[in-house]
Amino acid sequence: MTRSPFQILVVPFRRASELIEFGVLRREDMDVWQAVVGGGEEGETPERAALRETSEELGLEMLAPLYRLQTMASVPARFFADRISWPTGTYVVPEYSFATNLTGVQITISREHTDMQWLGYQAAHDVLRFDSNRTALGELHERLLAADLPTPVE
């Protein structure tokens, strides 16, 4: 299936007693820490892509609540092999950000990753490689502190 010209990013979080922890994944192919990331497939909305990628990368047996964040970024199209099938003049693709609550959810990471850690905000911020990941993490952290998560995506 052809990849659509957009990217999704999903920041996993969980509540551990009074603490909030954020999930970061080590990519197998790049050896960097990041959130769940992936591309949309043909005909998929960013929300559907975020649900699918989260399920695939974290081995979820059931869908967890997904929240759309305001954070957006742009990724150069040259990083994607499928760019040759995209409209002429596509130089950057949007990256839509989400969060998912995995409190009490069993996770089994995919082969795309070699490790996963649950970290506090500052530790997660410090290990994340990409600015877009750190920005989405920061927004989620502020929203959780303010008890201001958006309505879950359906």
Image: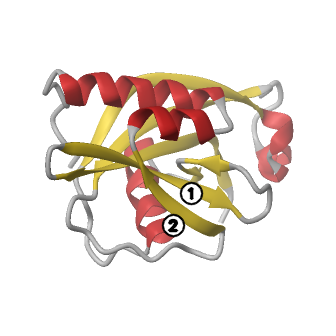
Residue 24 locus on image (x, y percent): 51, 51
Residue named by callout 1:
25
Would you say residue 95 is visible in this rendering? no
Out of 123 and 151, give the one closest to the viewer.
123
Amino acid type at mark 1:
Leu
**In the picture shown, does residue 71 fall above or below 109?**
above
Q: Nearer the viewer, residue 133 or 94?
A: 133
- Number of other residues with Cα within 10 Å of mark 1, as a class: few under 14, some 14 to 19, many 20 or more: many
Residue placed most toward the observer, 5 or 16: 16
Residue 146: give its label. Answer: none
Q: Are marks 1 and 2 in contact (CB under 8 Å)?
A: yes
What residue lies at 51% left-to-right and 72% top-to-bottom?
109
Location of the N terminus (image quadrant) = bottom right
Residue 7 located left or right of residue 63: right
User: In percent of the image, x 54 and y 29: which residue is there?
Assistant: 134
Q: Mark 1 or mark 2: name the one nearer the start of the chain.
A: 1
**Quarter of the view holding residue 20:** top left
Residue 138, position as x, y percentages in the image: 42, 25
- The residue located at (14%, 52%) in the rendering is 17
138 relative to 63 in the view: left or right? right
Rendering quarter of residue 145 = top left
Mark 1 residue element: strand
Residue 141 screen position, x and y as percent: 33, 29
Q: Amino acid at mark 2?
A: Glu
Residue 69 lies in quadrant: top left
Q: CA distance from mark 1 to mark 2?
A: 9 Å
Q: Residues within 10 Å of mark 2 (few under 14, many from 20)?
A: some
Question: Element type at marker 2?
Answer: helix
Q: Closer to us: mark 1 or mark 2?
A: 1
Residue 71 in view in this figure: yes
Q: Which residue is mark 2?
A: 57
Residue 38, position in %: x, y? 59, 52
